[in-house]
Amino acid sequence: MKKLNVALVGCWHPHVPRYYPILQKRGDTALTCLWDSTFERGAAWSKQLHVPFVEDYDQLLKRPDVDAVCIVAETCRHAELMKKAAAAGKHIFTEKAFTLTVADAEAVREAVKRSQVNFGIAYIRATTPVFVLGKQLMEAGLLGEVNMVRIRNGVDASKMNDLPPDWFDRKTAGGGAWIDLACHQMYLMDWMLGEPKNITANAIHYYGRDVEDNVCAAVQFRNGTLGVAESTCSTFYSPYMFEIYGRKGSYICRIDAAETEIQLEAENLEKLRALLPGVNCKIEVLGGTVSNASVNSLFGARAIVKVPAAELPAQKEPIELWLDEILYNGKNPFDIECGVRLTRLMAGGQASLDTGKRIDF
């Protein structure tokens, strides 16, 4: 079996441990070498992963044992690293954020298309089973016309216990709770809701750093949906929340909970069961007749469905979809256009933070 040889490009982002085990464990891929912007970090990861550390990125791209690159470097370096990789004919997978400016995003897209290399981006929550279920409910019409999506993502990064110091330097990272954490909310909304109309963002610098600690953004989409994205780096504990509200149903997911909750019209239960074959859901039906006894009954029969998260079908990680596309011509929905759209949303939010104004797309 011919293996795809992949180089790890940058060891800055804390998601490095998410990728190298996949590259080392798959029988059809090999992690052959790595590069980092600093000698100390690169040498340390080289020792840990038992692969050569190549100090010169240009030389790494010339190596015959590098077919593709997995970029996990500082956000500010993404654009240049990707353009060079594309020019060298190397397939590209990148951690988000994609790039810091729309101009850079479009330049990378042009380079990728010119070289016809395969591109993938880390839309990791778009392959998380409980989030996939939310989109499936929308597409099946079980929630009716969706008018609100709310996603909250938070970590206790204030102690810097697992982040490099320059994570909080705007020149290096591009931003704080907005540019990296809120990427998850923005790509999920792009994935679910399509074209944005405008964005308004607000933030606080709780610890007085160069980058924001807490941020909230409201995005109006052209399909009439309002998206609310909340991110924090300064709370003790912030459960990852994913909520979808429609005219005929709601979906409420807390990523660390054993169950997610769907509330929908009881007449749609059979459609829901068809969507979740073999999943042992807990179902409670309320109301059903017009009566003064219960306000619930004014809306007809309402079903409350608890879905065990562990029973939802497993999904392949975005990096695996990218590898399968290269090796077996598989389908990878997280392509270069996703990267460009993500940068457009992130740059719009950053402009709103910088100016205090609503930004129209």
Image (cartoon, rainbow, N blue to C red):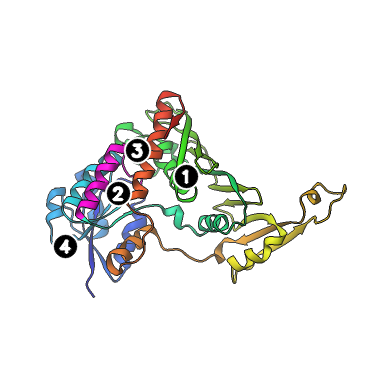
- Mark 4 vs mark 3: which is more N-terminal? 4
Q: Is label 3 or label 1 in front?
A: 1
Real-space CA distance between mark 4 and mark 2, rounded to the nearest whole angstrom: 19 Å
Residue at image coords 37%, 56%: 18
Q: Amino acid at mark 4?
A: Asp
- Mark 3 vs mark 1: which is more N-terminal? 3
Residue at image coords 71%, 61%: 267
Q: Amino acid at mark 1?
A: Gln
Q: Amino acid at mark 3?
A: Trp
Element type at mark 2 = loop
Image location (x, y in percent) of residue 328: 30, 69
Q: Amino acid at mark 2?
A: Val
In the displayed structure, would residue 12 be above or below residue 204?
Answer: below
**Image quadrant where one finds the C terminus:** top left
Name which quarter of the figure residue 286 lies in: bottom right
In the displayed structure, would residue 273 be above or below residue 75?
Answer: below
What number is the disc on residue 72? 2
The reply to whether callout 3 and callout 1 are in contact (CB within 8 Å) is no
Q: Is label 1 or label 4 in front?
A: 1
220 relative position to 325: left or right: right
Image location (x, y in percent) of residue 83: 21, 46
Q: Determine which residue is flagged by label 3.
A: 167
Q: Determine which residue is flagged by label 4.
A: 65
Number of on-image labels: 4
What number is the disc on residue 254? none
What number is the disc on residue 185? 1
The reply to whether callout 4 and callout 2 are in contact (CB within 8 Å) is no
Magenta part of the chain: 95-115
Residue at image coords 30%, 63%: 23
State whether the magenta stretch is mostly helix, strand or loop.
helix
